[in-house]
Image: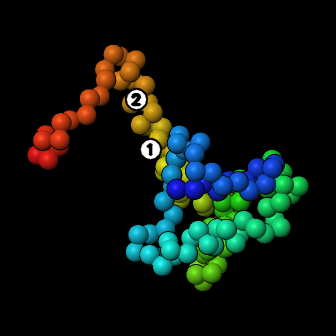
Amino acid sequence: GVVYNYNKEGVHRADTGWEQCISIPLVQPDVFGLLQQWDTLLEEFSAGESWLPQRYEEHDHNCYTYALAFINSVLTAQGKQQMSKSEFTEKFVIPQTKKASKYITLHHELTANDFYIVPLPEQEKQC
């Protein structure tokens, strides 16, 4: 999909260059209506004056702030309570980061010890 991000040059939309990022699922699969509106909501949110390039500040008004502010705007529209930075980090970011760290560590150990992974033939996958 398209990745929205915010930096000192403003909001960017990119469909490449994010292949090494960690995807954090935020929307439950049963909230299909919200998934259908997600891109429109994100586009409208990104057009706000808060996300102009000159507003960027490395420590207090950055890409993390942008992502959390968007999530909080969706929560508010749903009548739900907003999340703080620490709550969002603990609930969503840390669990995904731990999973990625375990995977990367395993990958490094396998490659460092001359192991490699071979995909199973299609017949064996079905068993």
Foreground residue among 44 and 56: 44
Residue type of the residue flagged with mark 2: His
Residue 90 visible within the image: no
Q: Position of residue 2 (x, y in %)?
A: 57, 56
Against 50, residue 7 (above or below) is: above
Q: Which residue is mark 2?
A: 107
Left/right placement of residue 58 relative to residue 115 reads right
Residue at disc 1, secondary structure: helix
Image quadrant where residue 73 sits: bottom right
Q: Position of residue 15 (x, y in %)?
A: 58, 50
Foreground residue among 29 and 89: 29
Foreground residue among 123 and 87: 123
Tell me the number on the disc at residue 99: 1
Seen at 49% across and 68% down, the residue is: 27
Q: Position of residue 37 (x, y in %)?
A: 55, 75
Residue at disc 2, secondary structure: helix
